[in-house]
Structure formats: structure tokens, C-alpha cells
Image (cartoon, grey):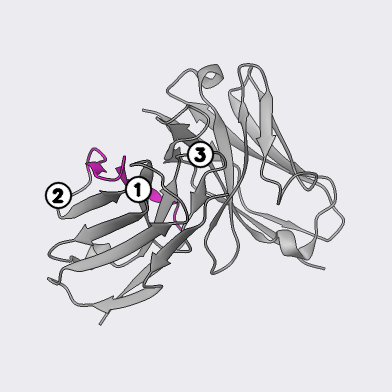
Amino acid sequence: EVQLVQSGAEVKKPGESLKISCKASGYSFTSYWIAWVRQMPGKGLEWMGLIYPGDSDTRYSPSFQGQVTISADKSTSTAYLQWSSLKASDSATYFCARPQGGSGMVGWFDPWGQGTLVTVSS
Amino acid sequence: AIRMTQSPSSLSASTGDIVTITCRASQGISSYLAWYQQKPGKAPKLLIFLASTLQSGVPSRFSGSGSGTDFTLTISWLQSEDFATYYCQQYYTYPPTFGQGTKLEIK
């Protein structure tokens, strides 16, 4: 079974750093892109960027470029999303998801991780 | 980026009803459209891709149609478990973009 399992909820203070994870199983991790999607409280889905673990090719939405870093570890089949200095406005649920079909990089998303709730508050 | 606009933003219906949600793209996207269902506190679930292809395991009361710029998701014979928020997403071009969502509520 293809599965993405994310790390647990986090509570952080503004200015702190954070790295959340998305562990893949059931398929060849290095052969598929993995994307990150943000959902702010009560709001819709926003595509943040994605990575191809095979060669670490990474792309970002202009809205998130410079705000987050996406990485992957082939040895553990895990993708990461990290912040160097969190802001209150980063409070949201973050999902990882695998694009399918389309061009490989752009496709429909399935499966999805269960989501990681990040709360940033002083 | 291609803008996806869903209508309505919210919808009230009763069990057994037929409902239709519309998604419009700001430019033609052929049939490169997916639909998702999301329940509170859960990840989105893929329902339909390629505008009308039902994902494995999704009940046949869900159907999708359209191409170019105008698309619809139809749910026939609404069941209690169908009350959720629905999103469309285009993958015709990079970056992929989502509609703002349609919340389907019980009347």
C-alpha cells in the first residue's frame, strides 16, 4: 500500500525553527515527486512546492520561495518541510502529497499524508 | 497561474438530493482536472481525475464532467457521509492550483 505518514503536531514560538517530515512507503521513493500543501485554519488548499527525491530537484511556489525549505532523505524515504524562523502566520496544517499522472511533476494528488498541525504562538 | 473558481462557496442539501458543484478555470485546461473531498481534521481524498475518471473505491454516485474551462462535480442520492468540503484542482500546467472550496452542509 502506498502511504505517506507525517510527523505529529507542533507548538512553537515565533522566531523558532521547525522541520516536519513525511515518510513514504509502498513505492519507489526516488521515482516520484512529493509536494507540500498548506491549509490555514478554515481556509482552502495552497500548493507550496515539491521535490524529486531522485535528484533533489526542488521547485517552490513564488508565495513560499524563501519562506520554507523542502528537502528529502533517500536513505529513509522521508521528505521534509522546514522553517528557519517561524511567524504566527505560519500556523496551519501542512500536508504532503504525491502528484500522479500528468507530467509527473504536475498531476492529481494521491495519496496524501494525514497532515501536520503547526501552531506558532507566543 | 491558472485561477480556479468554484461555485457555490457553500450549499445546503438533504440526504437523497442531487447536487452539482461547478469549477471554472481562468484558461483552458483540457481535461486535466481533479476533485477532492475533505472532512474536518482529515486530509483531502481524491474522488475524480481527468475530469471524469472515478478513483478506485469511490462510490458511483459521484461523477464529473467538463473540459476546457467549465467542469462539474455531481453527487447523486446524497448520503450523510457526503457532507464535506469539495475542491477542484487543475494540473494542466505548473503550478497546480486549487479552487477555493465548496462546503456542502446538511439542510
Q: Is residue A92 left or right of residue A42?
A: right
Per the model, the C-alpha gap separating discs 2 and 3 is 28 Å
Q: Secondary structure at mark 1?
A: loop
Residue A44 drawn at (x, y percent): 52, 62
Residue at image mark 3: B93
Q: Closer to the N terminus: mark 2 or mark 3?
A: 2
Residue at 63% from the left image edge and 31% from the top image edge: A79
State which chain disc 3 sits on: B
Residue at 31% from the left image edge and 55% from the top image edge: B71
Residue at 48% from the left image edge and 54% from the top image edge: B98
Quarter-of-image position of residue A109? top left
Q: Nearer the viewer, residue A20 or A53?
A: A53
Residue at image mark 1: B68
Instruction: Check disc 2 and give the amino acid type.
Output: Ser
Instruction: Check disc 3 and give the amino acid type.
Output: Thr
Q: Secondary structure at mark 3?
A: loop
